[in-house]
Image: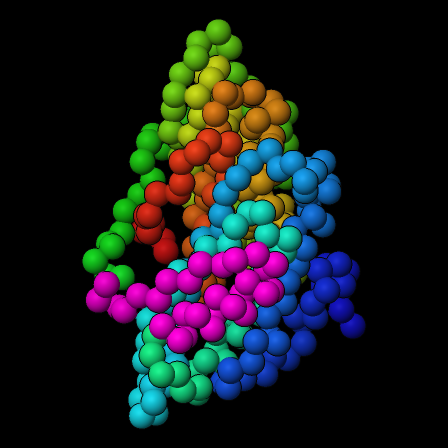
């Protein structure tokens, strides 16, 4: 029998899984974003942010016309305006279905993925397939800015609490880039832990760093999808601290050969192309 969480999101992921190695786009499972946005009071017709969900897939392979395996690293960009996110296990099963399927070239693979993922998400999805040598040139980096993880704090709250957020100097306007490697949330379907680093870039009254760290850590027992956790963070910081400009960017560690990296902003800039040490 499906659990309450599985019923809510229209998936039955507790059952034994058959891994299909022949191309099958029907494996993809969309999850409407509005299910969680409704809880946050977000109007889908007037989103308070723009952004993208960047996925990286490390286990992508298919056959060429001679039956020889090809491998690549795939990057997917799903716009935050898409009606649905893509359930991650269904995404992995879909990618596995390429393993024993022949394609003429890498271009055909990418175009096929763009068509299928766009149909699932309800919006255009950008796909980049990178040979391993090209991806290796990117290297491993870290978020720009200042790490707040050494702030002296006492923690006793492990569910999201926006009341933890306070201003340090309400009358002092600053521009800061702060990040933490201590974000953890949990999958709402399986309960498995999701580990991440999160960067908060803002311009406005100075946010108390200890309060921001306590708030980030408060997600530790929270069950929700990566994308919705970042949107909750964006809205809570915007409401409590009222910055003139705000960006929240989380990069989660990979699970099942996939990492998910949601980016939300009310500015015009885009996400930096960085791969963190735990990814």
- Please tell me whether residue 203 belongs to the stretch shown in magenta: no
Q: Is residue 266 visible?
A: yes
User: For the point 65% across and 70% down, which residue is it?
Assistant: 13
Closest to the observer: 188 or 53? 53
Q: Position of residue 2 (x, y in %)?
A: 76, 69
Against 72, residue 104 (above or below) is below
Name, please, the residue furthest toward the bottom.
Answer: 66
* Stretch in magenta: 107-134
The main secondary structure of the magenta stretch is helix
User: For the point 40% across and 40% down, which residue is it?
Assistant: 270
Marks counted in the figure total 0
User: For the point 60% across and 64% down, which residue is it?
Assistant: 120
Q: Position of residue 162 (x, y in %)?
A: 62, 29
Q: Quadrant of the N terminus?
A: bottom right
Against 185, residue 102 (above or below) is below
Q: Is residue 195 visible?
A: no
Q: In the image, 191: left or right of 150?
A: right
Colour option used? rainbow
Q: Position of residue 136 (x, y in %)?
A: 23, 61
- Please tell me whether residue 116 belongs to the stretch shown in magenta: yes
User: For the point 60% across and 33% down, which residue is it?
Assistant: 48
Q: Quadrant of the C terminus?
A: bottom left
Q: In the image, 22: left or right of 71?
A: right
Q: In the image, 177: left or right of 19?
A: left
Against 124, residue 34 (above or below) is above
Closest to the observer: 100 or 161? 100
Closest to the observer: 86 or 89? 86
Against 208, residue 31 (above or below) is below
Q: Position of residue 38 (x, y in %)?
A: 73, 42
Which quadrant of the view contains residue 151? Answer: top left
Q: In the image, 260: left or right of 15?
A: left
């Amino acid at each position: 029998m499906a659990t309450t969480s599985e019923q809510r999101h229209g998936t039955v992921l507790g059952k034994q899984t058959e891994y299909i190695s022949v191309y099958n786009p029907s494996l993809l499972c969309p999850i409407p974003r509005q299910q969680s946005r409704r809880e946050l009071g977000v109007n889908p017709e007037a989103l308070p942010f723009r952004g993208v969900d960047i996925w990286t897939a490390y286990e992508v392979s298919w056959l060429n016309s001679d039956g020889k395996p090809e491998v690549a690293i795939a990057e997917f960009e799903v716009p935050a305006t898409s009606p649905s996110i893509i359930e991650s296990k269904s995404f992995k099963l879909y990618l596995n279905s390429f393993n024993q399927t022949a394609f003429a070239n890498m271009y055909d693979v990418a175009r096929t993925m763009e068509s299928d993922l766009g149909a699932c998400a309800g919006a255009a999805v950008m796909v980049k397939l990178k040979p391993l040598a090209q991806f290796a040139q990117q290297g491993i980096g870290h978020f720009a800015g200042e790490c707040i993880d050494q702030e002296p704090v006492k923690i006793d709250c492990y569910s999201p609490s926006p009341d933890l957020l306070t201003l340090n100097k309400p009358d002092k306007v600053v521009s800061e880039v702060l990040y933490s490697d201590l974000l953890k949330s949990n999958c709402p379907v399986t309960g498995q832990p999701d580990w991440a680093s999160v960067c908060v870039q803002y311009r406005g009254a100075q946010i108390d760093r200890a309060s921001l760290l306590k708030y980030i850590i408060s997600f530790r027992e929270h069950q929700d999808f990566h994308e919705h956790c970042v949107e909750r963070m964006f809205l809570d910081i915007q409401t409590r601290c009222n910055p003139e400009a705000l960006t929240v960017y989380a990069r989660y560690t990979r699970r099942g050969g996939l990492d998910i990296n949601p980016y939300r902003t009310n500015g015009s800039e885009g996400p930096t192309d960085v791969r963190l040490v735990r990814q």
